[in-house]
Every structure is written in structure tokens, then in C-alpha cells.
Amino acid sequence: QVQLAESGGGLVQAGGSLRLSCAVSGGIFGLRAMDWYRQAPGKQRDFVAQITNVGSTNYGDSVKGRFTIFRNNAKDAVYLQMNRLKPEDTAVYYCHVIDEEGIGYWGQGTQVTVSS
């Protein structure tokens, strides 16, 4: 059973930083690309960042240069370092993975609130 658990969200002032963590269980972490998405109230869930199993990264345009995704394969964890946060970064942030059969899994999400 694949399970993802996000943590690290909170309230921060604009210009501040947060680091999100996602712990993955179920034995698939090392072979799979991992993603972060976010969803603001009343909006669709948007792509934030991806890291492949070999460490290649990709970012949404709105976070390039401010956010960094990285992973620790020994700990089955993926992280999102968020710097220079803006009020428009306020959202619930979700960790996501797709297994070998094409089944997608989501965590429960962690709330990030950036005050102006």
C-alpha cells in the first residue's frame, strides 16, 4: 500500500521560507519520479515541481528560481524548499507519485499560508 505523508506547512510572512517534507511508504520511492502540486481555494490543482529518480528537476513557471525540490532516497522522502514566498503561494501543497501501473497517489496535503 503506497502512502504519502506531507508535513512542514504553516504560516509565514511574505519573503520568508518554508521547507515541506513528504514521506513515502510502500516500496516504490526509489524508482519513481516525485511531484509537488498545490491547490488554492476555488482553484484547480497546479503543478509545482518534479524530481525524477535520477535527480532531474522541473518547475512550474511561477516558482522557478524560488523553490527547490530534492529527495533523499535513503529516507524515502522528497522535500520542497520554498524561498521568497509570496501571498499567491498560499495553498494546500500535495505530494504525488505514479506507480508502475499508472496509478496515482496523493498525500493528505499540508497548508501553506503566506501573509502580506
Image: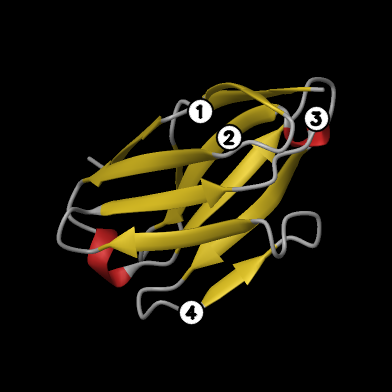
Residue occupied by mark 4:
56
Density class for disc 3 (Cα within 10 Å; few <14, some 14-19, many ≥20) is some
Q: Secondary structure at mark 4?
A: loop
The quadrant of the picture occupied by the C terminus is top right
User: What is the CA distance from the residue labelled 1 to the residue labelled 3?
Assistant: 18 Å
* Quarter holding residue 2: top left
Amino acid tagged 4: Ser
Q: Nearer the viewer, mark 1 or mark 3?
A: 3
Which residue is depicted at the point 74% across and 36% down?
89
Dots 2, 1 in contact, CB < 8 A? yes
Amino acid tagged 3: Pro
In terms of depth relative to the viewer, which is nearer, 3 or 53? 53
* Quarter holding residue 58: bottom right
User: What is the CA distance from the residue labelled 2 to the residue labelled 4?
Assistant: 21 Å
Density class for disc 1 (Cα within 10 Å; few <14, some 14-19, many ≥20) is many
Residue occupied by mark 1:
109
Q: Earlier in the sequence, mark 2 or mark 3?
A: 3
Q: Earlier in the sequence, mark 1 or mark 4?
A: 4
Left or right position of 71 against 27: right
Mark sitting on residue 87: 3
Against 7, residue 69 (above or below) is below
- Residue 48: percent from left, percent from top: 66, 53
User: What is the CA distance from the residue labelled 2 to the residue labelled 3?
Assistant: 14 Å
User: What is the CA distance from the residue labelled 3 to the residue labelled 4?
Assistant: 28 Å
Dots 1, 4 in contact, CB < 8 A? no
Q: Nearer the viewer, mark 2 or mark 3?
A: 3
User: What is the CA distance from the residue labelled 2 to the residue labelled 1?
Assistant: 5 Å
Which residue is depicted at the point 84% across and 21% down?
42
In terms of depth relative to the viewer, which is nearer, 67 or 26? 67
Residue occupied by mark 2:
93
